[in-house]
Amino acid sequence: MNFGPFLIILLFTSIACLGQNNVPFTDSIRAINNIPELSYAVVTDNAVLEIQALGKHSILLNDPATLNDRFHIGSNTKAMTAFVIAKYVEKGKLKWTTKFFDIYPEWKHNAKAAYLNITLQDLLSHRAKIQPFQGENDPLIPEFKGTNQEKRKSFGKFVLTLDPVETDATHKFVYSNADYTLATLMLEKVTKKSWEQLVHKVFNKDLKLNVKFSWPENQIAKETWGHSSENGKLIPIPSNTTYRLDYTEPAGDINIKLKDYVKFVQLNLDGLKGHNNYLTAKTYQFLHKGISDYSMGWYNIYENGKELSTHSGTAGTYYTLVHIDRINGKAYIIFTNAFNLETQQGVRLLMRKLKEHYGS
């Protein structure tokens, strides 16, 4: 399909703020909860109802927040990785039911038997029983060498030698960052391109969304600083600080401007309304609702008559939260540049306020 006119005409035409009634409340929430910068948006598939950037880049700087600021989105990267994979499923490079060891048969002899039949959709929906690799109580990981892609392959081989995590009626899936490394390895093998190259192709070249990797660069430009928490105090983290996501970048290592992330969410809203755009409407339905509880990069929630796709994201220095109201066709997006209990509390309060204001 010719996607260019769709880009220009349909989704990306409306970025004007139609309502600013929540600014005073939001800024008070930001200040009370010691959040240096908080940006948020409320959108439909073809309009931005409200969008604001409040605060400053760091607790140690006076640079004011702007809508050109970049935020590390942590695990909200998962939906973007699933989106990229979905494009290549549509191209016929993979199927959702393709088994991992159909792509890597040479790895089978060292893998645990419990993993022999895991599929692409099992990995993206966290049904593969892979160890979580979320930073707490993780198995000791060897120091792998090579390019990012080569290190992901070594990590993937290692992960498959570990014992599975069992599920039950209460815990129906095992949320695992390593799942997204393994799913990405499948894509990298069949496309002969790296995750980084594929993200660049889909989001930067095709969709013009200006996606970057790792933390926003704050050492050579006026940009957001992430803040960790130590003894109850926020600590600004320079972007040249060495940190590791333990080879799980496809699960959580993208940074983006809020106004560009809005466009990504609008594509999803439009697809959920039944329209084909960059992906088909059928694909959007599967990404969001194809698997119960957790689908492809989105929690799939039905409660109190509501139908939601949600996700939060953090790598310990930024915190982002997204709710898509699938019934009312609205999405609520909150980006911050800090992570602690206060930040989470402030974001939850703002999310509740925005949803009340806009009728979700």
Image (tube, rainbow, N blue to C red):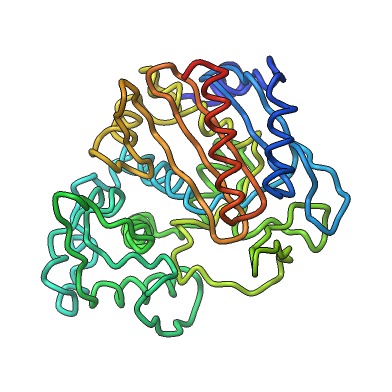
**Quick check: 150 left or right of 262?**
left
**Quick check: 10 left or right of 152?**
right
Q: Please tell me whether residue 90 is drawn above or below residue 11 in the rendered image.
A: below
Residue furthest out toward the right: 62
x then y, percent, for residue 353: 57, 27
Quarter residue 50 falls in: top right
x then y, percent, for residue 96: 23, 45
Q: Residue at x 62, y 42 (%)?
A: 335
Quarter residue 135 falls in: bottom left
Quarter residue 58 falls in: bottom right
Number of marks present in the image shown: 0
In the image, 339 versus 88, the foreground residue is 339
x then y, percent, for residue 123: 27, 54
Q: Residue at x 48, y 24 (%)?
A: 2
Q: Residue at x 70, y 61 (%)?
A: 234
x then y, percent, for residue 180: 37, 57
Q: Residue at x 53, y 21 (%)?
A: 356
Give the quadrant of the N terminus: top left
In the image, 132 versus 93, the foreground residue is 132
Q: Please tell me whether residue 244 is drawn above or below residue 61 in the rendered image.
A: below
In the image, 218 versus 9, the foreground residue is 218
Q: Please tell me whether residue 47 is drawn above or below residue 256 in the rendered image.
A: above
**Quick check: 156 left or right of 78?**
left
